[in-house]
Image: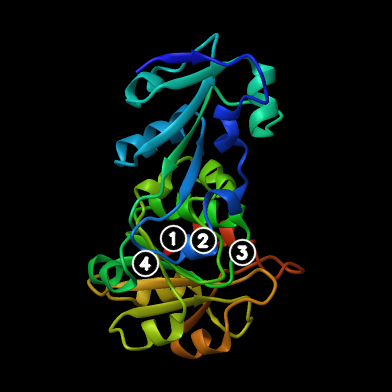
Amino acid sequence: MAFIRIEAVDDERLAVFRLRERGLTTRADKRDDTGAGLFLAEGDLVVSRALEAGCEPLAALADADRVPAVAERLGIDVFIGGDEIRRLVTGLGMPHPIVAVFHRPARPSPAALLSRCHRLVVAERVDNPANIGGIVRNAAGLGWDGLLLDATSADPLSRRALRVAMGTAFTLPHARTPDLAELLGGLDIDLLALTPDPDAEAIDVVAGQLDPRRPRAVLIGSERAGLSDELLELARGVRIPMADGVDSLNAAAASAVACHVLR
């Protein structure tokens, strides 16, 4: 490998770093469990975690004055440049010491994920990447096994989600399915749906009634519309008790409470 100094912001060798989400990964790529498309990892921690998870690097751009140690572990030529070059290329106001483009890894099928999960987080219509990143970090940090997403939820490997999750998306397996209700409806598993409904059972009370030997899943919906009626009919509704005048937390914060209380 070698470090290659970049002097011009319009250097064509840096084109891959200018790609936005749709340039890195198409909709078809996101539906492909075999690992089609690319993702961008920002910062030495996220790059290191992607590498440790076995992801294959395609290109990297690092700080010429302070090249992070992880750059030498990538096994590819690494472009280096000053702050202004890296800021203009990546579109980040504060450029990271290193950014790297990786090939997207294969992910488990929904059936494979369910077969090995004892504690599962399910996200429906959570389309904000920051919320998905927060959910991933909370679930991974609190010992949950996996994340199951519907087709409309944000990508855990998107730039913003990866930044928020601090690279924990590589240790928390995730899968996608076009029909959560059909997939979950036939399972022998405790389904617990987060809802602001004041008539739902308090989450801490429900936690004390569950058999810890049985697998369970916590279901988290959109902040605007919540969970679909189909999932609410399948699951046991649970609420996080709130102060007067506040009906709910945002999706990421609610996932932290739920993953802690229900684990």
Q: Is residue 207 above or below residue 47?
A: below
In terms of depth relative to the viewer, which is nearer, 167 or 56? 56
- Labels 1 & 2 near each other (Cβ < 8 A): yes
Task: Assign the N terminus to one quadrant of the image.
Answer: top left
Work out how far the residue at label 4 is from the one at label 3, CA to CA, in angstroms: 19 Å
Secondary structure found at label 4: strand
Q: Mark 4 against mark 1, which lies toward the viewer?
A: 4
Is residue 91 toward the left or the right of residue 188 in the image?
A: right
Q: Does label 4 or label 3 sit earlier along the sequence?
A: 4
Q: Which residue is mark 1?
A: 259
Secondary structure found at label 2: helix
- Labels 1 & 3 near each other (Cβ < 8 A): no
| Residue type, numbered disc 1 | Cys
Q: Where residue 72 appears, x then y in whole percent?
A: 36, 19
Q: Is residue 241 above or below residue 14?
A: below
Indicate the quadrant where residue 52 lies: top left
Q: Does label 4 or label 1 sit earlier along the sequence?
A: 4
Work out how far the residue at label 1 is from the one at label 3, CA to CA, in angstroms: 20 Å
Q: Mark 1 against mark 3, which lies toward the viewer?
A: 3
Q: Where residue 144 appears, x then y in whole percent?
A: 35, 58
Q: Which residue is mark 3?
A: 127
Task: Assign the C terminus to one quadrant of the image.
Answer: bottom left
Residue at (42% x, 49% y) in the render: 169
Q: Which residue is mark 2?
A: 255
Q: Which residue is mark 4?
A: 120
